[in-house]
Image (cartoon, rainbow, N blue to C red):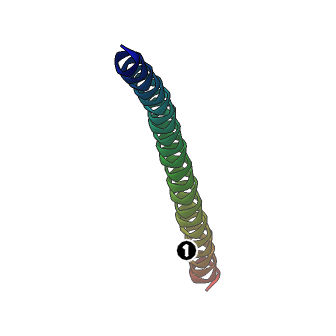
Amino acid sequence: MATDLRMRQSLDQFEDAFEQESALERRRRQQLRQRAVARSKARRIHSTEKHGNISFGVLLVALTLTVVVVMVVMFETLAWLMA
């Protein structure tokens, strides 16, 4: 009878410990998922910013090149008309 009671207490303790460990594991998995989502979002933002900076640089170079070409053509045409 006493061994049955001790065995029952031991099983109850084991079940309680198992439930606590399961709850801890669930929380840990949830935190890992949240961290993964946050890292993914940060990478996406970084990629978007990088792409935006590159696009802006290309636009700036294209506008500068257009201004230079138009000025050269304009002055060449003016020189040709004055001659």
Q: Quadrant of the C terminus?
A: bottom right
| Figure quadrant of residue 49 | bottom right
Q: Is residue 56 above or below residue 39?
A: below
Q: How many marks?
A: 1
Say what secondary structure mark 1 lies in: helix
- Using the image as rendered, state which of residue 1 and residue 74 is in the foreground: 1
Q: Is residue 7 above or below residue 32?
A: above
Residue 48 appears at what percent x and percent y?
52, 50
Residue 4 appears at what percent x and percent y?
34, 17
Q: What residue do we see at 44% from left, 20% from top?
A: 9
The type of residue carrying mark 1 is Val
Determine whether, in the image, residue 76 is placed left or right of residue 21.
right
- Using the image as rendered, state which of residue 76 and residue 50 is in the foreground: 50
Determine whether, in the image, residue 47 is placed left or right of residue 78.
left
Residue 18 appears at what percent x and percent y?
41, 29
Residue 22 appears at what percent x and percent y?
42, 29
Q: Residues within 10 Å of mark 1 (few under 14, many from 20)?
A: few
Q: What residue do we see at 42% from left, 22% from top?
A: 6
| Figure quadrant of residue 11 | top left
Q: Is residue 2 above or below residue 78?
A: above
Determine whether, in the image, residue 83 is placed left or right of residue 26.
right
Q: What residue do we see at 61% from left, 75% from top?
A: 68
Look at mark 1 in the image and give the residue it sits on: 69
- Residue at the outermost bottom position: 83
Q: Quadrant of the N terminus?
A: top left
